[in-house]
Image (cartoon, rainbow, N blue to C red):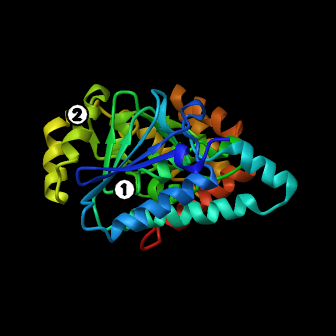
Amino acid sequence: MSTTEEKVLVRVEGRLGRLTLNRPRAINALDHDMVTALREALTAWEHDDAVAAVLIDGAGERGLCAGGDIRAISASARERDGAAAAFWRDEYLLNEHISRYPKPYIAFMDGVVMGGGVGVSAHGSVRVVTERSNVGMPETTIGFVPDVGGTYLLSRAPGEAGTHLALTAGSVGAGDAIALGLADHYVPAERLSDLAAALTEATGAGDVAEAVGRFAETAPAPTLTGERWIDACYSAATAEEIVDRLRGHGDPAAAAAADTVLAKSPTAVKVALAALRRARELPGL
């Protein structure tokens, strides 16, 4: 079993606090020890004048984070030991902490960024995607709902694109991630190491913005936000009506979306839709 220190690499380079999720064989899936390590580091650096900004990334070439450790969560559910509930409690507190962090919190959303990976990145203040980014909330596939503040984020996407992603458990690339409000900047993956080096010299938000601006490029064009069938179909009040509209719209993509929604957990789809509608009315995370 890896130690907590090995699963999250915590160090300071220059004035940059660096957090690297270090379970590459599991695409850096989060467990409770990792969540605890992240919270402890963020709390310490929040009050450390020697640290001007924080950067989170993932080890390996596959992605930042594939989400929570589903095997551990499943085992906890079978054993009824309360471990999954404790994990989620601390994970959600971590996500909230990230959302209000007083120093620049930069996330390299390279590769797979799913579920809990969205939680440790998309609530940050500087969110960087690459040509390899694959961002999404896949929870309805496993009978769960978009958590880690995912319903809050998706409810604020333009039109009904967030509803589409939530109910279908779909994922998006860099262009759509930026258009939907899940990311801010596009930087080619091969330039991330140079950007990280530049960030070690940043002394505040202005320097971080300048460094990111030097490496950022024009993102690929989004695809979802221009699809009229998404708003027309997903604005319905119930899951049943959404599926009926998708089936009857006439666009092949809409029909395919209907089939995808119907393949998910019906309870998860209904709860996710209700959560998204409620999240739109919330004043904050």
Mark 2 — residue?
A: 194
Give neighbour class at mark 1: few <14, some 14-19, many 20+ (Cα, 10 Å).
Answer: many
Q: Are marks 1 and 2 in contact (CB under 8 Å)?
A: no
Determine the image quadrant of residue 111: top left
Amino acid at dot 1: Gly
Residue name at image x 50 percent, y 47 percent: 8
Q: Quadrant of residue 80?
A: bottom right
**Which is more toward the observer, 153 or 224?**
153
Q: Residue at x 55, y 34 (%)?
A: 27
Q: In the rendered image, which quarter contains the N terminus?
A: top right
The image quarter in which residue 108 lies: top left
Question: Which is closer to the viewer, label 1 or label 2?
Answer: 2
The percent coordinates of residue 11 (x first, y second) are: 37, 50
For numbered disc 1, what is the local secondary structure?
loop
The circle on residue 61 is none
Left of 233 or right of it: where is 108?
left
Q: Is residue 4 left or right of residue 186?
A: right
Could you say which is closer to the camera, residue 50 or residue 206? 50
Q: Mark 2: give few (<14), some (14-19) or many (20+) Cα within 10 Å.
A: few
Callout count:
2
The residue at which mark 1 appears reads as 124
In percent of the image, x 35 and y 64: which residue is there? 45
Q: Residue furthest right?
A: 79
The answer to whether residue 65 is seen in the rendering is: yes
Q: Is residue 231 visible?
A: no
Q: Residue at x 50, y 36 (%)?
A: 171
* Amino acid type, callout 2: Asp
Say if 238 sits above or below 67 in the image.
below
Query: Measured from the top left, where is residue 284 in percent x and y?
Result: 42, 71
Q: Secondary structure at mark 2?
A: helix
Q: Earlier in the sequence, mark 1 or mark 2?
A: 1
- Distance (Cα) linking label 1 and label 2: 20 Å
